[in-house]
Amino acid sequence: MIQTIARFISSALTVYMMIIFVRIVMTWFSGVSYGRFHAALASVTDPYLNWFRRNTPVRFGVMDFSPIVGILTLGVAQNVFTQLAVAGRVTLAYLLAVSISAVWSVISFFATIFLIMAALRLVGMLTGLDARGSRLWIVLEQVVNPLLQVVVRPFLRGRFTSYRDSLLIFCGVLLATIVAGRIAVSLVISLVRQIPF
């Protein structure tokens, strides 16, 4: 009975994640009118997405990453119910491993995204491409700068440095975080899985 219910919930969460993904894709084309279909999707998905928009500090400049956190949360729940449907029980070791993996997925995702954006901005500076005045560079700075200032400040200790050097430090810290974090999380999960309950 429990496995049947868990299987149903797991399937429902999978469908809901797909609906949310469709809703997110539709927001990319704001000039298109979808009529009642759009309104129906919004009524089902927006209350959930809006909760994460209000309660998760993952908005950087003009970029809002809260939908990604919402989808990852659903993914964790879906994995738990899938495990329950297959095995009939969920162990503490499994819950901890899934939770740690999910938290790291969020951290590594944002670190990778910001590393790519900072690297693009740095390439633009080094090659002189930003001299053309493209809005791309302005948008990249608006997104990257709030986090860059927080990350770089401890390394400067009140000293002035160029924006280029700040980007280099920022990229180095993010790259080190991604590599070290991946190794550390793998070790922690391997230890957690040895918990016998």
Image: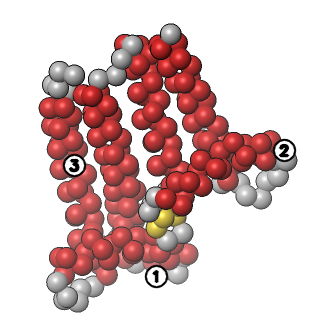
Seen at 27% across and 28% down, the residue is 92
Q: Which of 153 and 48 is in front in this view?
A: 48
Q: Which of 139 and 126 is in front in this view?
A: 139
User: Can you say whether 43 is above or below 173 in the image?
Assistant: above
Q: Determine the secondary structure under disc 1.
A: helix
Labels 2 and 3 touching (C-beta < 8 A): no
Q: Return the residue at label 2.
A: 36
Seen at 39% across and 75% down, the residue is 145
Q: Report the mark closest to the observer, 1 or 2.
A: 2
User: Can you say whether 186 is above or below 119 in the image?
Assistant: above
User: Can you say whether 95 is above or below 177 in the image?
Assistant: above
Q: What residue type is labelled 2?
A: Arg
Q: Which of 132 and 183 is in front in this view?
A: 183
**Numbered badge on residue 181:** 3
Quadrant in the picture for residue 19: top right
Nearer-N-terminus badge (2/3)? 2
1 left or right of 144 in image: right
Number of residues whose C-alpha sits closer than 10 Å to that of mark 3, classed few (under 14), some (14–19) or many (20 or more): some
User: Which quadrant: the C terminus?
Assistant: top left
Nearer-N-terminus badge (1/2)? 2
